[in-house]
Image (spheres, grey):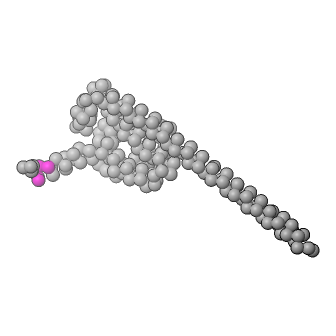
Amino acid sequence: MTVIEQLIVNHSKMSDWLQVAANVGIVIGLLLVGVQLKQNSDLLKTQLLYEESHRAIELETQVIGENGADVWAKSITDAKNLSLAEQRVMEALCRSFTEQLRATRMLAELGLLEDEEWRIRVNAESAFYLANEYGAAWWVNYSEGNTSLPHDLVAAINTRLSEVDTDFTVNYNKAVLDLVIKHGTSDN
């Protein structure tokens, strides 16, 4: 075989290898595009869920109005005497809180938060909002049979509420006030 023939054969082999490498590069590129499209889809879903959650919370915030704190206080000290209007304010407060937990859990489901993060939030906050006479009754009524709530979220809230007194909210606020009284006020 002549030198020219050898060069042609070598060039042909090199061309074949380059073609294989180019094809592998194209496949890798397509896979990367697919991954990026999936990430963009997840981010869009997250954004849409947050917008939906924000709209729901905004509506409920309007219902709560200026007397929300007074109605909330009455709900933990005199729940049996809430008027229908006051019950609606409490519905708005409780729904907003639950919607925030649901949204946090969805972020974990999408992989944007660790699963443990939404569970920590449930443990830290659900007793404060729901471990009182009105909150507990509202939660039972709202959560039972509610298919829009993820089962693991309902289970986590139920577990937390089973771990604390039904007067948790009252006792928590009393403990804070007792500390304020014990330490007095500063003369700043």
Task: Residue at 38%, 29% (x, y): give it.
Answer: 59
Q: In the displayed structure, does residue 177 sit left or right of residue 103?
A: left
In-front residue for pair 60/169:
60
Task: Residue at 16%, 47% (x, y): give it.
Answer: 177
Q: In the displayed structure, does residue 62 sit left or right of residue 185?
A: right
Tell me which segment is drawn in magenta: 180-184
In-front residue for pair 57/46:
46
Above or below — where is 55 with respect to 5?
above
Q: In the displayed structure, does residue 56 sit left or right of residue 34?
A: left
Residue that sits furthest to the left in the current view: 187
Specify the principal SS of the magenta part: helix
**x and y percentages locating residue 146 in the rendered image:** 47, 37
Task: Residue at 26%, 44% (x, y): give it.
Answer: 169
68 inside magenta stretch: no
**Residue 137 seen in this snapshot:** no
Above or below — where is 26 with respect to 102?
below
183 inside magenta stretch: yes
**x and y percentages locating residue 113 in the rendered image:** 45, 52
In-front residue for pair 127/121:
121
**x and y percentages locating residue 48 in the rendered image:** 49, 38
Residue that sits furthest to the right in the current view: 1
**x and y percentages locating residue 101 in the rendered image:** 40, 44
Above or below — where is 9 with respect to 168?
below
